[in-house]
C-alpha cells in the first residue's frame, strides 16, 4: 500500500489519504515544492477505504519517517479522535485536513478554511449565500464567521447535520444564520448576497446541472464554486454570462496546499504556482 524506499532511510513520508483518491492533485502540488526545495521526501496518494484501515494507518503515522498527511473525503471528521492536539479551527469546524507528526505527536489543522478565503480576501462583504452543507461547507461557514461577516444564508437539503456546527460558531462569533431548503431558494435570495458559494457537488459529475435560481445572478456579485474539475461548470457559465465575477475551486485547493506545506516544512510556497500546476493538469484532463 505505502511505497518505501529502503535504500534511503532518511526519506520523509507524506501523503493525502481518502477514498477515492486517484485523481487528487495534492501529490502534484506538494512533490513539486519538495523537489524545488531539495527536501528528501516523497508525497503519495493513499486510498483508505474504511475506519479499520484508517485506524491502522494513523498508528503507522506516529512512527517511521512520517512528516504528515492531508486528509480528504470521507475521513476529515473521523481522524480527529486519534490526534494529540488540534487547532481551534479544527475544534470549531469539526474537520481536519492536515496532520503533522512531530516525534510521534499528531497535531491536526484545517487549512481549507483559510484556503477558501485566499482568493476573495480583497473583495468580500458582510454576507454570503452558501449552497450545501457537506464537509467543505463547514470550513466555508466557519471562515465567513471568522472574518466578521454579519449574516449567512445556508441552503441545504437537510439542515440537521449543520446544527451542531452552527451552535459552535454562534458560541464564538456574532453572526446571523438563516436556514433554507432548496425549495425555498428564490431569485431574491440569490440577488441579496454579494457572495454566492456553491459547496455542493452539483456540476461535478455532469457539468450541465444547475440550480435554476442562479440565472438571477447579477454582474456586481461573486459566484464562487468549490469545484475545479470540470474547470467550468454549467453554473459557472451561467454566472459568467450574467457578468458576475466567477471563481472556481482551484485557488482554494492551491492555497490550502500552500498552508499545509508550511505546516509540514516551515517553508512558504506561492499558492499561485500551485494554482498553475492544478490548472494545467486539470485542463489537460
Ligand atoms: P460532501 O461532504 O459529500 O458534501 C456534498 C454536499 O453537496 C452536501 O451538502 C450534499 O447534500 C450536496 N449535494 C449533492 N448533490 C446535491 C443536489 N443534487 N442538490 C442539492 N445538494 C446536493 O462533499 P464535500 O467534501 O463537502 O465537497 C463538496 C464539493 O466541494 C465537491 O465538489 C468537492 O470537490 C469540492 N471541494 C473542493 C475543495 C477545494 O479545495 N477546492 C475542497 C473540498 C471540497 P446532502 O448532504 O443532502 O447529500
Image (spheres, rainbow, N blue to C red):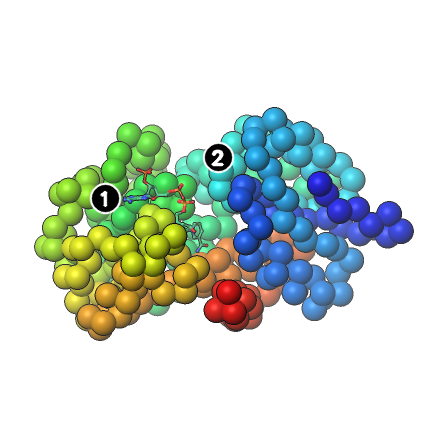
User: Which residue is painted at 66% across and 34% down in the image?
Assistant: 57
On the question of residue 167 being in view, the answer is: no
Give the Cα distance between marks 2 and 1. 22 Å
Q: Is residue 194 above or below residue 244?
A: above
In this rendering, is residue 236 above or below 243?
Answer: above
Crowding around mark 1 (Cα neighbors within 10 Å: few <14, some 14 to 19, many 20+) is many
- Residue that numbered label 1 is attached to: 155
Direction from residue 30 to residue 91 in the image, left or right? left
Q: Residue furthest right?
A: 7
Q: Position of residue 18 (x, y in %)?
A: 55, 42
Circle 2 Cα neighbour tier, 10 Å, few/some/many (<14 / 14–19 / ≥20): some
Q: Position of residue 129 (x, y in %)?
A: 23, 51
Residue 157 in sight here: yes
Please provide percent x and percent y for residue 183: 15, 42
Residue placed under numbered mark 2 in the picture: 77
Of the numbered discs 2 and 1, the one sitting upstream in the chain is 2
State yes or no: discs 2 and 1 in contact (Cβ < 8 Å): no
- Against 144, is 78 above or below? above
Residue at image position (78%, 40%) is 64
Q: Residue at x 48, y 58 (%)?
A: 253
Amino acid at each position: 500500500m505505502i511505497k518505501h524506499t529502503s535504500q534511503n532511510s532518511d526519506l520523509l513520508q507524506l501523503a493525502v489519504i481518502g477514498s477515492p483518491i486517484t485523481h487528487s492533485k495534492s501529490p502534484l502540488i506538494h512533490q513539486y515544492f519538495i523537489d524545488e526545495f531539495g527536501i528528501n521526501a516523497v508525497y503519495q496518494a493513499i486510498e483508505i477505504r474504511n475506519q479499520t484501515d484508517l485506524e491502522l494507518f494513523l498508528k503507522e503515522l506516529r512512527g517511521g519517517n512520517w512528516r504528515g498527511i492531508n486528509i480528504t473525503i470521507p475521513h476529515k471528521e473521523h481522524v480527529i479522535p486519534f490526534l494529540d492536539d488540534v487547532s481551534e479551527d479544527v475544534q470549531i469546524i469539526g474537520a481536519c485536513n492536515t496532520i503533522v507528526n512531530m516525534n510521534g505527536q499528531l497535531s491536526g489543522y484545517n487549512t481549507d478554511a483559510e484556503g477558501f478565503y485566499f482568493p476573495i480576501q480583497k473583495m468580500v462583504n458582510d454576507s454570503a449565500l452558501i449552497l450545501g452543507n457537506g464537509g467543505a461547507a463547514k470550513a466555508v461557514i466557519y471562515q465567513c464567521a471568522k472574518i466578521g461577516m454579519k449574516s449567512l444564508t445556508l441552503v441545504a437539503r437537510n439542515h440537521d447535520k449543520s446544527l451542531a456546527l452552527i451552535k459552535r460558531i454562534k458560541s464564538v462569533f456574532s453572526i446571523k444564520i438563516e436556514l433554507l431548503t432548496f425549495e425555498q431558494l428564490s431569485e431574491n435570495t440569490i440577488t441579496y448576497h454579494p457572495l454566492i458559494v456553491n459547496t455542493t457537488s452539483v456540476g461535478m459529475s455532469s457539468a450541465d446541472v444547475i440550480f435554476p435560481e442562479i440565472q438571477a445572478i447579477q454582474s456586481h456579485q461573486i459566484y464562487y464554486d468549490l469545484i475545479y474539475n470540470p474547470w467550468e461548470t454549467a453554473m459557472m457559465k451561467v454566472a459568467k454570462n450574467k457578468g458576475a465575477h466567477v471563481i472556481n475551486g482551484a485557488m482554494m485547493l492551491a492555497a490550502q496546499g500552500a498552508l499545509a506545506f508550511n505546516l509540514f516544512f516551515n517553508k512558504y510556497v506561492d499558492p499561485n504556482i500551485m494554482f498553475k500546476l492544478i490548472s494545467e493538469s486539470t485542463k489537460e484532463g
